[in-house]
């Protein structure tokens, strides 16, 4: 197996050549981990604004604004991650340009409240301009260094696509305010079309295991932010109300949901399926719902806590839905993107979709809704592990077929 000659240490200047798809021991770098952590602020800002909107009863506008704002967070992270998987040369220009992108993330995060509450995207778009200037420079550098004409053409297409889309975001600032959300959807479609068009003839050499690890790490970060948000909400409520009997079930249910979400997501070695863009691009795009729903669970827990102590102007059912709906979305999308490819038989295939439906049914359980949803999440893991173990006893693989996870990685 080949190994990229610069994968271990930085240098002042190197040619930005494509890394090998079969490179051994490819893992996330400290710079990539640092890059991910910069998004914690943006995710927290989006979650905080969602909490405020839901607690005030502005469910429709709150959810739409959250989805719009979170798209910017997810898309900026995704653009960098796939580029780095193919062209991380770890020299000084690469590091500096990545740090510039991180600065742009912080500017975007600062603009999240205004974009969410006032539909004012000026600061957020400014942050994107900073990120896009750096990333476009990276793609142009890759195009200049590539010896393969097809790969160079792909890099130039990315650079051109980024510039065109960014001009569209700048133009959005001058559009009438009541038309911005519809124009936003058009620009989203344009953004999503850039990778398929750019990679139509010569795909970039992203590393399957590295990409799977990067997505997994960001999932951990988002789930960690969810736990933090829920903990802070419970602590603040206890300081003001001491309503332990009301808050303990919410805290316990929320923890069970997050723990089960982690277990379920990491149950399968998804890198084995990331063999081509035909599967990888829909898989990567689908993670928008996984990341957004995982972050929204934390916001939902905060709303449930505020409702329990009388600070939220919503019903018990609405507060419960703030937790159960994103939890159900998470379960279903993880099944759609990951688990269904590793399960055999109706029983194993039904576990996550049925659990998602039961999670939604918990919405109407009154003040025990979040706790019951947590029980459903825990039982989901238990049932999945039991079914996988029975499959092994019958002589099959844990997931029911060749290429599934090892016995040490039971499927939920």
Image (cartoon, grey):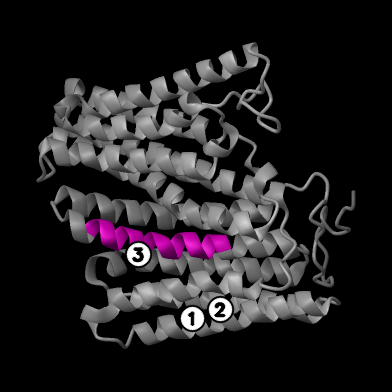
Q: Give the left or right position of residue 362, taking residue 153 as reference.
A: left
Between 102 and 360, the one nearer to me in the picture: 360
Question: Are dots 3 and 1 in contact, CB under 8 Å?
Answer: no
Instruction: Find residue 398 and report its image quarter.
Output: top right
- Separation (CA) of disc 1 from disc 2: 6 Å
Instruction: Find residue 83 and report its image quarter.
Output: bottom right
Image coordinates of residue 388 in percent, x first then y, are 57, 20
Q: Secondary structure at mark 2?
A: helix
Which is the main secondary structure of the residues drawn in magenta? Answer: helix
- The answer to whether 175 is drawn above or below residue 141 in the figure is below
Q: Give the left or right position of residue 237, taking residue 27 as reference.
A: left
- The answer to whether 337 is drawn above or below residue 39 in the figure is above
Residue 123 shows in this picture:
no
Q: Give the left or right position of residue 100, taking residue 64 as reference.
A: right
Q: Which residues are magenta?
A: 62-78
Q: Is residue 65 magenta?
A: yes
Which residue is tagged 2? 162
Between 36 and 148, the one nearer to me in the picture: 148
Return the mark for residue 166. Answer: 1
Between 406 and 354, the one nearer to me in the picture: 354
Which residue is tagged 3? 68
Q: Secondary structure at mark 3?
A: helix
Between 396 and 40, the one nearer to me in the picture: 396
């Amino acid at each position: 197996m080949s190994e990229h000659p610069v994968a271990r240490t930085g240098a002042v200047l190197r040619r930005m050549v494509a890394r090998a798809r079969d490179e051994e021991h490819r893992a996330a770098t400290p710079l990539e981990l640092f890059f991910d952590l910069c998004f914690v602020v943006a995710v927290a800002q989006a979650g905080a604004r969602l909490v405020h909107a839901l607690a005030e009863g502005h469910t429709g506008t709150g959810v739409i604004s959250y989805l719009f704002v979170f798209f910017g967070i997810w898309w900026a992270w995704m653009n960098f991650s796939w580029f780095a998987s193919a062209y991380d040369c770890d020299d000084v220009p690469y590091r500096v340009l990545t740090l510039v992108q991180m600065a742009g993330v912080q500017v975007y995060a600062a603009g999240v409240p205004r974009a969410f509450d006032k539909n004012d995207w000026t600061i957020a778009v400014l942050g994107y301009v900073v990120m896009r200037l750096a990333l476009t420079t990276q793609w142009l550098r890759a195009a200049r260094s590539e010896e393969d004409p097809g790969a160079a053409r792909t890099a130039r297409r990315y650079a051109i696509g980024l510039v065109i889309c960014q001009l569209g975001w700048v133009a959005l600032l001058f559009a009438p305010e009541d038309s911005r959300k519809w124009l936003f959807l058009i620009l989203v479609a344009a953004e999503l079309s850039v990778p398929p068009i750019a990679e139509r003839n010569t795909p970039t050499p992203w590393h399957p295991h590295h990409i799977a690890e990067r997505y997994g790490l960001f999932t951990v970060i988002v789930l960690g932010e969810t736990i933090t948000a829920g903990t802070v909400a419970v602590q603040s409520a206890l300081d003001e109300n001491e309503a332990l009997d009301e808050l303990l079930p919410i805290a316990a249910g929320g923890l069970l949901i997050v723990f089960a979400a982690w277990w379920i997501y990491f149950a399968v070695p998804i890198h084995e399926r990331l063999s081509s863009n035909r599967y990888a691009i829909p898989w990567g795009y689908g993670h928008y719902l996984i990341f957004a729903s995982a972050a929204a669970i934390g916001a939902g827990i905060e709303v449930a806590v505020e409702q329990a102590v009388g600070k939220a102007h919503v019903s018990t059912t609405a507060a419960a839905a703030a937790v159960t709906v994103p939890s159900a979305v998470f379960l279903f999308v993880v099944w759609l993107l990951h688990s269904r490819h590793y399960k055999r038989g109706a029983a194993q295939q039904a576990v996550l979709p049925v659990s998602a439906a039961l999670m939604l049914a918990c919405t109407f359980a009154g003040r025990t809704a979040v706790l019951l949803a947590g029980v459903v999440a825990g039982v989901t893991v238990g049932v999945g592990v039991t079914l996988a173990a029975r499959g092994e006893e019958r002589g099959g693989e844990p997931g029911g077929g060749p290429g599934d996870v090892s016995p040490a990685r039971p499927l939920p």
